[in-house]
Amino acid sequence: MTSRILVIEHGSDGGPGRFGPWLADAGVEAVIVRPYAGELLPKDLEHDGLIVLGGAMGATDDERAPWLPGARALLRQAVAAGVPTLGICLGAQLLAVACGGEVARGAAGPELGACPVTVAADGDALLGGLSGTPRFVQWHFDVITVPPPGAVPLASSAMYPVQAFRLGDVAWGVQFHPEVTQTDMATWAASDAVVMRERGQEPREVLADAIAREDELAVNGHAVAAAFAAVVRACQATPAAAPERA
């Protein structure tokens, strides 16, 4: 049986990227909704899982992105119902705000490029297969300053302590991008080139470093996608059961 998950996309340069084929390979169909293009978010979540992707807006920038209240409502609904949920970058920030956390501009500046993340997630169903300091693409200006009540911390970085957290048994937020493609990253670097150079980062060098680390980034990203797909399939097979943790 194929599982169907709702994927909320906030912009044309922030799609599911490599997650699309990875999830499909694991028997999970991604149903993408693009509210920025006029598509309406459902009021009720009737899917086997939810992924909320990244975007250039802030987590409470409702005037710029009027669909954000609906996205936050779906996230709250998913957490309350125990539906497998993954928020990526902006999606993680939306999950945090929706459930009582706080987000602000990062005091240390943006975190950009292929960066090491310190994972402390033994037994976690999503990140438990990672250890040490795996690298992921980071591309964010805002950060989660106060995690939601009850959030379990799972990862940190040298710049910002909240890189991943879990709410309940099957809802996660990750500040980093396990899904991003080189094409998307090149688009982001072109858009943020002025800011990057002001901070002493040359966009071409940041991209070249990510390309050089492509194998590692792909392995780490695939591990996250496969683990999330496994959670979705497990919850679909046994709706009342949450994945076991050590």
Image (spheres, rainbow, N blue to C red):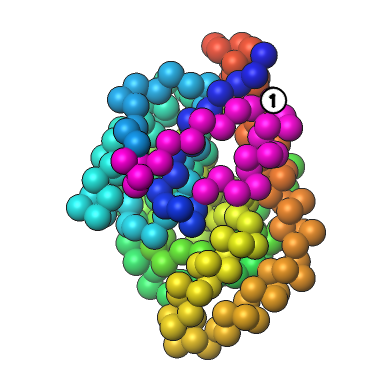
x%, y% of residue 135?
Answer: 68, 61
Which residue shows up at 56% across the image and 45% down it?
16
Q: Quadrant of residue 38?
A: top left
Which residue shows up at 45% across the image and 72% down it?
191
Q: Is residue 240 visible?
A: yes
Q: Does the stretch in magenta take in 28? A: yes
Q: 94 above or below 29? A: below
x%, y% of residue 68?
Answer: 30, 44
Q: Which residue is mark 1?
A: 27
Q: How many marks?
A: 1
Q: Quadrant of residue 73?
A: top left
Q: Is residue 76 left or right of residue 92?
A: left
Q: Which residues are magenta?
A: 15-38
Q: Identity of the amino acid at label 1?
A: Gly
Which residue shows up at 32% across the image and 62% down it?
104
Label 1 residue SS: loop
Q: Quadrant of the C terminus?
A: top right
Q: Is residue 245 visible?
A: no
x%, y% of residue 8?
Answer: 44, 39
x%, y% of residue 179?
Answer: 61, 50
Q: 156 above or below 149? A: below
Between 41 and 229, the one lying in front of the other is 41
Q: Does the stretch in magenta take in 96? A: no
Q: 138 above or below 59? A: below
Q: Quadrant of the N terminus?
A: top right
Q: Residues within 10 Å of mark 1 (few under 14, many from 20)?
A: some
Q: Residue furthest left?
A: 63
Which residue shows up at 69% across the image and 25% down it?
27
